Amino acid sequence: MMDNNKPIFPELNADDSGATEIESLCMNCHSNGITRLLLTKIPFYKDVIVMSFSCDECGFHNNELQSGAPVSEKGIRVHLKVVEPRDLNRQVVKSDYTAVKIPELDLEISSQSQKGEITTVEGIIDRVIKGLNQDQIVRRISHPEEAEKIDNFIERLKALKDLKDPFNLIVEDISGNSFIENPFAPQVDKNCKIEYFSRDKEQNHQVGIFTQDEIVENEDSAILKPIQEGEFPLENFEGEILQFHTNCPGCNAPCETNMKMTNIPHFKEVIIMATVCDVCGLRTNEVKSGGGIEPKGLHIEIDVNGKEDFSRDVLKSETCDLSIPQLDLEVGPNALGGRFTTVEGLITAVRDQLSDRKNSHIFGDSINKDSKENFEKFLKKFDEILEGKLPITIVMDDPAGNSYVQSLSEADQPDEYLRITHYERSFEQNEELGLNQMKTENYE
C-alpha cells in the first residue's frame, strides 16, 4: 500500500529504491520473468517511470524509461543554430513524441521513431550515424549503390561536427516535453528560438487527448455528460469558492485546488486558482483570464526607479512574455504562468524561479565554476533592484491582450512611468493562440 505521506514520484534514494516487482511474461523464451517499476524524479528534469525486465531462464533483459509528467497544454518547437563547438555539447531532452530536423541535409527523424532520452546535439548526430552504419556491411554486398549513397550521407553528417559551416537543428515536440540547454542562462540565447504551438486534432489524439464529444458516444449512458448551455449561469460562480480534485504539480500526489472568479477594477473578470499539497508542501497560485482573447495584442513597459514603484498591481497572463532589458533577461509565458501580484511580487517570483535548484536546469552537476559564479552575481542584481538601487524597465508582451498593470494616476490613464500600446497580432502569434486552427474548424 502506498504511503499517503510520501510523494508519488520521490527523489532518487539509494537507501530506499521504492521499486515494485511484478511477475510477467518473457517475450524471448515465454517463461516468467520479473519486471521492476520505479517511479522517481530525475534532478533537473522531470518525473519518470523506470521499467526493467529480466528473465533468469534465458538471460533476456530490457530497460525502458517513460515520462510521468502530464502532457503540456501546447507543443514546443526549438530552433537552434549551431555555430561553435559549445553548441554541439548542449544538453537536449527528447520525449517519445519529438521530431528532429536538420534542414541543410534534408534530414528528419520522425516522431515516435525513437525512445525519449537525455543527450546532446552531437549525440543526436552520432545516433543517426550509428543507425545508418548498422547494416552497411551486408548492404555493401547486396546493394552496393545504396551503400555508397549512405556512406556519402554519413560523411556529410560527420562534417557537421567539424562546423566548417553553421547548421540548424529543429526539435519539435507535440507533447511539449522537450528542451535544449541555454549555456548563457539566464541571459538570452541568441542562437536559439523557442515557439509554442497549439496541437491540431490528430496531434491531440497522438498524445492521448480526446474531447468530451469524442469520448462520449451515448450521452444517456455516459459517466461524464457535457454541460448544457445555460445549465450553470455565470452569476452562480461569482463570489463562490469552488474546490475540485487534482494532482500536485510538484510530486503528483492527489490534492485540492480552490478556484474563485473575481473582478479586477478597470480591467476584467479573472479566475484565481490556488493549490496546496499536504504531501510535499507545495503552494501554487495561478490566474487565468475569464474574458477570452482580446482583438489586439498588448505591449506594456513599466519603469521601476525605486521602492515606490513596487506597489503597482500587475496581472501577468499565461500568454504573456516578460523581459528586463537591463539584465538581458527574457522569461517566456510558461515560466511564471498566470499570476496576479505587484511589481515587487513579480520581480521576486522571477528571482525565486531562477534560484530554484530543484527545478532549474541551470544547477546541473556539469555546470562549471565560472558559470556558477556569474550566475550568483546575476542573482545579486535582483537584491539591488528590490532595494531600489538598480532602476529597471519591465517589458510585458501579451499577444492575447489579457495582462494588466495598475496606473498610479488618478484618472486611471497611463502615468509617466507606464507605457501601454496595442498591436495587430502576427500569423505566428495567432497560431500559438490557436486562432488560426479555430478559423479553419469554423470554416469546415
Image (cartoon, grey):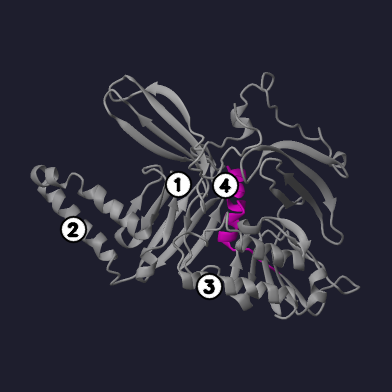
Q: As shown in the figure, which amino acid type bears the numbered disc 4?
A: Ser
- Between marks 3 and 2, how big is the CA–CA gap? 45 Å
Is 317 above or below relative to 190?
above
Q: Are marks 1 and 2 in contact (CB under 8 Å)?
A: no
- Between marks 4 and 2, how big is the CA–CA gap? 39 Å
Residue 210 is left or right of residue 337, and the answer is left
The residue labelled by disc 1 is: 95
Q: Nearer the viewer, residue 428 or 100?
A: 100
Q: Which residues are magenta?
A: 422-444
Where in the figure is residue 92, as x and y percent of width and height? 43, 56
Q: Secondary structure at mark 2?
A: helix
The residue labelled by disc 3 is: 373
Q: As shown in the figure, which amino acid type bears the numbered disc 3?
A: Glu
- Between marks 1 and 2, how big is the CA–CA gap? 29 Å
Taking the spot 83% from the left edge, 75% from the top edge, the residue there is 308
Q: Nearer the viewer, residue 123 or 442?
A: 123
Q: Secondary structure at mark 4?
A: loop
The residue labelled by disc 2 is: 152
Q: As shown in the figure, which amino acid type bears the numbered disc 1?
A: Ser
Among numbered discs 3 and 2, the one appearing first in the sequence: 2
Taking the spot 76% from the left edge, 68% from the top edge, the residue there is 344
Is 359 above or below relative to 4?
below
Q: As shown in the figure, which amino acid type bears the numbered disc 2?
A: Asn
Taking the spot 47% from the left edge, 50% from the top edge, the residue there is 173
Secondary structure of the magenta portion, mostly? Answer: helix
Taking the magenta stretch, the answer to whether it contains residue 281 is no
Taking the spot 86% from the left edge, 62% from the top edge, the residue there is 266
Among numbered discs 4 and 3, the one appearing first in the sequence: 4
Q: Residues within 10 Å of mark 3 (few under 14, many from 20)?
A: few
Instruction: Residue lying at the far left in this picture: please name it.
Output: 141
Residue 256 lies in quadrant? top right
